[in-house]
């Protein structure tokens, strides 16, 4: 992490460290954690955990035993556990954020139904250009005709009608 290279290795350097997407953060976040007086872990247990590809568990065990021997919760520092996993194992209380602002309601509805028991409340207001309904609109252009030139077919009146409709979005 860049923190190791740019900040002094001083315990409690920051009053508060916030780790967002903690369900995707591995033990690589340890240099940041040691600099925190307090830690706020933000994550989602329904999201993917970090990949432990290329990490040898035996090497992690050696380092953990050498440098963290006797430290509480050191056993949770494994390549398979995310920071979110560790925090939820150590601390019982958590808060689930129920309002969702990131995705279009039609997109989050799948996850909401299949993973969150419809507890998520979509809050994003769609821009007119993002509205999905209706997905297809038929517009009749009575004056349209197809021109054929060099094996290309062009209907200029229909093209202009499409442009005018797009301007309305």
Image (spheres, rainbow, N blue to C red):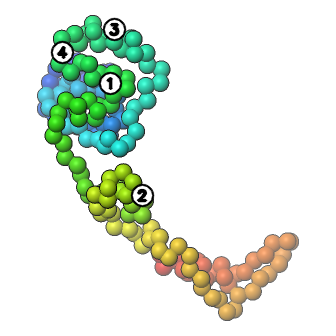
Q: Is residue 117 left or right of residue 8?
A: right
Q: Residue at x 59, y 83 (%)?
A: 138
| Image point (19%, 46%), residue name | 95
Badge 1 vs badge 2, beta-carbon distance below 8 Å: no
Of labels 4 and 1, earlier in sequence is: 1
- How far apart are labels 1 and 3 at the CA level? 14 Å
The numbered disc on residue 110 is 2
- Sequence-wise, which precedes: disc 2 or disc 3? 3
Q: Quadrant of residue 108?
A: bottom left
Q: Tag 3's secondary structure?
A: helix
Residue under numbered circle 3: 62
Q: x, y percentage for residue 90? A: 19, 29
Determine if residue 22 is in view.
yes
The residue wearing badge 4 is 71
User: Is 104 located above or below residue 4 in the figure?
Assistant: below
Tell me if residue 141 comes above or below residue 4 in the rendering.
below
- For the residues carrying marks 4 and 2, which lies nearer the camera in this image? 2
Q: Residues within 10 Å of mark 1 (few under 14, many from 20)?
A: some
Q: Is residue 160 left or right of residue 98?
A: right
Q: Nearer the viewer, mark 4 or mark 1?
A: 4
Q: Nearer the viewer, mark 1 or mark 2?
A: 2
Residue at the (13%, 28%) spot, across then down: 37
């Amino acid at each position: 992490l860049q923190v190791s290279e740019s900040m002094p290795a001083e315990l409690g350097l920051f009053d508060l460290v916030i780790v967002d997407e903690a369900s995707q953060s591995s033990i690589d976040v340890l240099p940041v954690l040691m600099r925190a007086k307090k830690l706020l872990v933000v994550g989602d247990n329904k999201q993917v955990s970090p990949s432990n590809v290329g990490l040898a568990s035996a090497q992690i065990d050696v380092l953990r035993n050498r440098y963290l021997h006797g430290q509480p919760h050191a056993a949770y520092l494994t390549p398979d556990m995310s920071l979110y996993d560790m925090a939820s194992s150590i601390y019982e209380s958590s808060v689930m954020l129920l309002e969702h602002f990131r995705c279009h309601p039609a997109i989050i509805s799948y996850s909401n139904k299949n993973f969150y028991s419809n507890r998520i409340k979509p809050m994003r207001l769609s821009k007119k250009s993002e509205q999905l309904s209706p997905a297809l609109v038929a517009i009749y252009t009575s004056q349209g005709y197809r021109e054929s030139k060099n094996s290309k077919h062009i209907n200029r009146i229909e093209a202009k009608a499409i442009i005018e409709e797009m301007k309305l979005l």
